[in-house]
Amino acid sequence: MRRSLVTILAGIALLTCTSQNEVYGEWKEYPDVYIDGDLVDEKGLSYIEDGIAYVPLRQICEKFGAEVSWSGEKREASVTDNDLNITVGEGDWYIIANGRYLYAEGGCNLQEDNLMVPVRTIASAFGAQVNWDATTGDVHILDVGKPITPGDNFYLSEDVLWLSRLIYAEAGGESLEGKIAVGNVVMNRVADESFPDSVKDVIFDRRYGIQFTPAYSGSIYNEPSEECIIAAKLALEGTKVVGECLYFTAAWAASDSWVARNREFYGQIENQLFFM
């Protein structure tokens, strides 16, 4: 079975779900959440699932001093503060903060008219720090930073361009997770000293043979879809769904591929196999 980021986080956090408000070891399923000592969620809506703490968007953002509005037509919330604008759509696996795409593992889910979001994701938009209290199992947020740097000052347009084009060529028909996974491979190579140190150079690298066929077949020049651009930005943010994988191949071609014979298999996402 493919190892997912959820599993990894759950293992690291050692979170075990029990009955409501019951503490099991150091953690409880329905934690209290505080910002600078003030209780965020007086209705007790916050919960932990698969090692991830979720909080109601409106309550936490208002505690930060932001204004929240909801569009029933678009099924999305808008958050505004002095130097921060956030959009969160029901069912989305990311939030948009100052033009940045932040991965929301498990998705943003509507429960009893409350849009629930992962606490670490929304806190990072405000530049806040999240800590766990090992004694009580509660979540403490420290409002210590500044809102997230705008996307225009964070993303390099060349990186977004080439990464989104490659994702479209290699995984245009895959899910968002599958698209991010392809982006992960490129970014892992950028960080690995065995490969070039820029997105474009990694994609067009052919020192040991062509690495990405679309770069030389011409399909790299096709216009990427919006979701491929989003996946590229999520990968550039450091979102990882396939760990440190450096290779992937289509499942139908794996039996005859060099990578399947020579690299450690990590897992499969839809039609792609990933290797370390």
Image: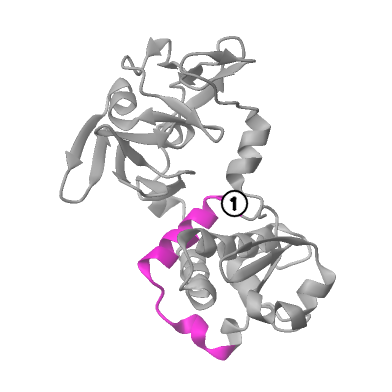
Residue at 43% across, 10% down: 37
Residue closest to the far bottom: 217
Q: Which residue is mark 1?
A: 240
Give the residue type at disc 1.
Lys
Colouring of the image: one colour
Q: How many marks?
A: 1
Residue 166 sits above or below residue 65 on the image: below
Q: Pick the residue in front: 247 or 24.
A: 24
Residue at 67% across, 33% down: 12
Q: Position of residue 219 (x, y in %)?
A: 50, 85
Q: Position of residue 110 (x, y in %)?
A: 30, 38
Residue 242 sits above or below residue 258 on the image: above
Which secondary structure is most common in the magenta stretch?
helix
Q: Position of residue 129 (x, y in %)?
A: 50, 26
Residue at 51% across, 81% down: 220
Q: Position of residue 91 (x, y in %)?
A: 35, 48
Q: Pick the residue in front: 92 or 64.
A: 92
Q: Is residue 92 visible?
A: yes
Which residues, given as a range, are shown in magenta?
217-241
Give SS at disc 1: loop
Within-10-Å neighbours for mark 1: few <14, some 14–19, many 20+: many
Residue 275 sits above or below residue 254 on the image: above
Q: Indicate the quadrant containing the C terminus: top left, top right, bottom left or bottom right.
A: bottom right
Q: Is residue 83 visible?
A: no
Residue 94 part of the magenta segment: no
Q: Indicate the quadrant containing the N terminus: top left, top right, bottom left or bottom right.
A: bottom right
Residue closest to the far front: 19
Residue 240 part of the magenta segment: yes
Residue closest to the far right: 262
Residue at 47% across, 20% down: 142
